Amino acid sequence: MYTLTCKNIVRKVDNDFTLGPVNVKFPAGTITAVVGNNGAGKTTLFQALSGDYPGEGEAKILGHNNHDMEGKASFSYVPQSFPEMLPFRLQQLRNFHAAHDATWQEDRFQTYIQQFNLPMKKRMQHLSIGMQRKAVIALQLSRDTSLLLLDEPFAGLDIEGQTQLQKILLSKMEEDPDCCIVFATHVADEVQRLADFIVLMKQGKASAPMEKDMLGERWKRVWVEKPIEGMENAPGVRDVQREPALQLVTSHAPETEKWLENKGVNVVKRTTLPLHESLPLMLNDEGHTEDIGKENIRG
């Protein structure tokens, strides 16, 4: 089952940037990291999924259009910025949700207030950036929804806040088997700690979700015993490093090692390439930019 389905979503920003078309499905029971460099379109995508911005295409949440009341009641959204909330006190924002939101869970909200040590009577604009974000997280995660859309949720949080949020998100996944979390980030460590799937964004285009563990199987650093002509152009090889020992960085380890075997070259050692090394290579590979976003939704 797919919690969130995006079909042909397009958003034009000014005259110099276009998001999409985006065609992606997000399965229930998974956490997906949307990863991209600054300006790739992550925030524009999340704004489009929130249903509050005009454009083309369709986003459905558990079968409901994100513009409909049923759709809006099915997801919680933590934006990157929230200027409309800053003039209000957290108590006022809580009162609004409690009075008008059928998904509101007061006991959950009180738990978050205690965990984050949030002041209820201060105006949001008088809180630190980190405390503002904690307040919005507390409000949105106190809604009983099966989809969480989080635009860089860890940004501005202190170390304790990051740990608390990670525990909250993992606990949410355990409690609700149909829950789906989609979060934007450009921090590899956040992807490593939380994500099941990765969606890459480049120049407004989004890839199909890729299993994080599959990337670990494909992206390797391979040490070889001797150089051989043509190894720079071997299948999957993205980089050749000769110091301190001869090693190849590959995005298709099985194909690379098969090529080496056919050339009579032994592999001395292999390790999985960490995400903080493989993700920049994927995002900055201009030769593969045209492949992003070609996955079409079927069915």
Image (spheres, rainbow, N blue to C red):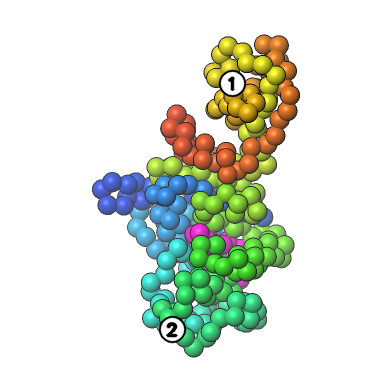
Q: Residue furthest bottom?
A: 121
Is residue 4 left or right of 173 when viewed as pictured?
left
> Is 28 displayed left or right of 66 in the figure?
right
* Residue displayed at 63% across by 34% down: 219
Please indicate, yes or no, whether residue 176 appears anywhere in the rendered image: no
Look at the picture and state if 207 lies above or below 237: below
The quarter holding residue 246 reads top right
Asked if the stretch drawn in magenta spans residue 148, the answer is yes
Using the image, determine if residue 80 lies above or below residue 235. Answer: below
> Closer to the camera, 268 or 282?
268
Looking at the rendering, which quadrant does residue 232 occupy? top right
**Which residues lie in the magenta part?**
144-153
Q: Is residue 73 above or below residue 188?
A: below
Q: Which residue is mark 1?
A: 235
Amino acid type at mark 1: Pro
Labels 1 and 2: the sequence-earlier one: 2
Q: Nearer the viewer, residue 293 or 278?
A: 278
Which residue is labeled 2 in the image?
Answer: 123
Please tell me whether mark 1 sits on a helix, a strand or a loop: loop
Residue 155 position within the rendered picture, expressed as x and y whole percent measured from the top left: 51, 62
Helix, strand or loop for disc 2: loop
Which residue appears at 56% of the width and 74% of the height?
138
* Kind of residue at disc 2: Arg
- Number of residues whose C-alpha sits closer than 10 Å to that of mark 2, classed few (under 14), some (14–19) or many (20 or more): some
**Which quadrant of the figure contains the C terminus?**
top right
What distance separates the C-alpha of mark 1 from that of mark 2?
A: 58 Å
Q: Are marks 1 and 2 in contact (CB under 8 Å)?
A: no
- Residue occupying image coordinates x 48% and y 39%: 283
Residue 203 visible to the viewer: yes
Q: Residue at x 57, y 49 (%)?
A: 188
Find residue 241 and report its horizontal and vertical position in percent. Answer: 58, 26
